[in-house]
Amino acid sequence: MTLSLPYGPIFTNINVYLSIAEGALAESTRLLEANRTPKPDGQPGYILSSDPERKSFKQSCIAIAFAGMYLGALLSIIGRARLGKDLYKKIERITTYEEKLRLLGVCEQHVLASCKRFRKTRNDLMHESAIDFEKLAAGEIRTAQEEAVFGVEFVKSIGSKLLPAP
């Protein structure tokens, strides 16, 4: 794809990353729903069938990873356009997504909090460590499927804030 920016057109795969994330999310959701049946006698909730190959989880992981690739590319493209190549190159590896958004003029607390949630989820996925049983006991364990929905919607909202209208 060619993206027109104030300093001229650039070639980028950014839309491919988002398309992969959206496709994986759709497949994750489809697989999750296919393995879900209502509880008997109209009780609230669902019964999940076994998924030994963890297909829905895998698709959620793909969605989160590619949503992160999209966000990283988006911030790089817009950061270089607004801050200049040299300055952006200096901050690219040493700042969080939230700090980059602030530098690009996105300062709404709810957006930055959502960004932090996405960053933590993505980092937990990409750099897995042992389960923290204190977090488990406190109910702080997230599901990949819920976080994939959140992450894809979040990066799309950032894209609509930062990219020029087509």
Image (spheres, rainbow, N blue to C red):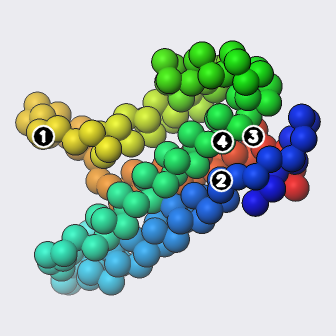
Upstream in the sequence, badge 2 or badge 1? 2
Answer with left or right where residue 155 lies relative to residue 26: right
Question: How much space separates mark 2 and mark 1, taking CA atoms?
Answer: 33 Å
Instruction: Identify the residue at horizontal 80%, vertical 25% (top origin).
Output: 82
Amino acid type indicated by mark 1: Ile
Q: Which residue is mark 3?
A: 161
Q: Which residue is mark 4?
A: 74
Amino acid type indicated by mark 3: Lys
Question: How much space separates mark 4 and mark 2, taking CA atoms?
Answer: 7 Å
User: Which quadrant, please, contains the N terminus?
Assistant: bottom right
Residue 161: quarter of image:
top right
Q: Which residue is mark 1?
A: 131
Residue 111: image x %, image y %?
A: 59, 32
Q: Which residue is mark 2?
A: 14
Q: Secondary structure at mark 2?
A: helix
Q: Secondary structure at mark 4?
A: helix
Q: Are marks 4 and 2 in contact (CB under 8 Å)?
A: yes
